[in-house]
Image: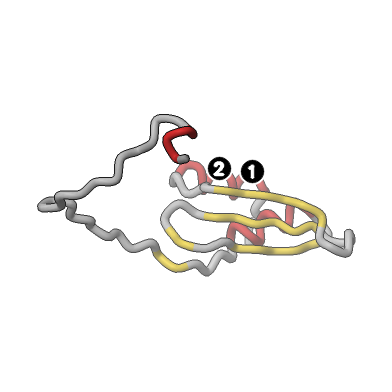
């Protein structure tokens, strides 16, 4: 069994275009590292904690169990009313 490194995991995800967000911060108790990961093609965020920050990132990125994004088609044809985009903050007042 080959041990994955953070480089291996991140390069694989980047090659597939799947990195939307990755973060790493100390946990509330300060004894662990908390990593989070969000993919582009699935909905949700995966979290993992570990004493080793690299391991926390690897776990968050490789154990993600998120829902597949569904594509919805929005048909605006036949709509008479469109909401204009304000040009300045004053237009909102």
Q: Which mark is residue 15?
A: none
Name the quadrant containing residue 34: bottom right
- Crowding near pointer 2: few (<14 within 10 Å), some, many (20+)? few
Q: Is residue 7 placed above or below 2 in the rendered structure?
A: above
What residue is shown at x 64% (from left), y 43% (from top)?
7
C-alpha distance separating marks 2 and 1: 6 Å
The single residue placed furthest to the left in the displayed view is 78
Q: Nearer the viewer, residue 69 or 73?
A: 73
For the N terminus, which image quadrant?
Answer: bottom right
What residue is shown at x 45% (from left), y 30% (from top)?
88
Where does the image place residue 49, in percent across and percent down from the top left?
75, 63
Residue at label 1? 7
Secondary structure category for the residue under label 2: helix
What residue is shown at x 50% (from left), y 54% (from top)?
39
Secondary structure category for the residue under label 1: helix
Where does the image place residue 84, in percent across and percent down from the top left?
30, 40
Name the quadrant containing residue 75: bottom left
Q: Residue 11 carries which label?
A: 2
Where does the image place residue 65, in percent across and percent down from the top left?
52, 69
- Crowding near pointer 1: few (<14 within 10 Å), some, many (20+)? few
Left or right, residue 24 beside residue 89:
right
The single residue placed furthest to the top in the displayed view is 87
Q: Do the residues labelled 2 and 1 touch (CB within 8 Å)?
A: yes
Q: Is residue 57 placed above or below 92 in the rendered structure?
A: below
Left or right, residue 85 beside residue 42:
left
What residue is shown at x 40% (from left), y 65% (from top)?
68
Where does the image place residue 86, in percent across and percent down from the top left?
38, 36
């Amino acid at each position: 069994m080959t041990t994955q490194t953070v480089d291996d995991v991140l390069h694989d995800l980047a090659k597939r275009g799947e990195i939307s967000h990755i973060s790493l911060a100390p946990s509330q108790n300060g004894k662990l590292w908390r990593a989070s990961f969000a993919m582009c093609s699935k909905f949700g965020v995966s979290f993992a904690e570990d004493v080793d920050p690299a391991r926390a990132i690897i776990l968050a990125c490789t154990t993600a169990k998120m829902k597949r994004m569904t594509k919805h088609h929005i048909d605006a044809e036949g709509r008479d009313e469109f909401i204009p985009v304000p040009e300045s903050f004053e237009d909102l007042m």
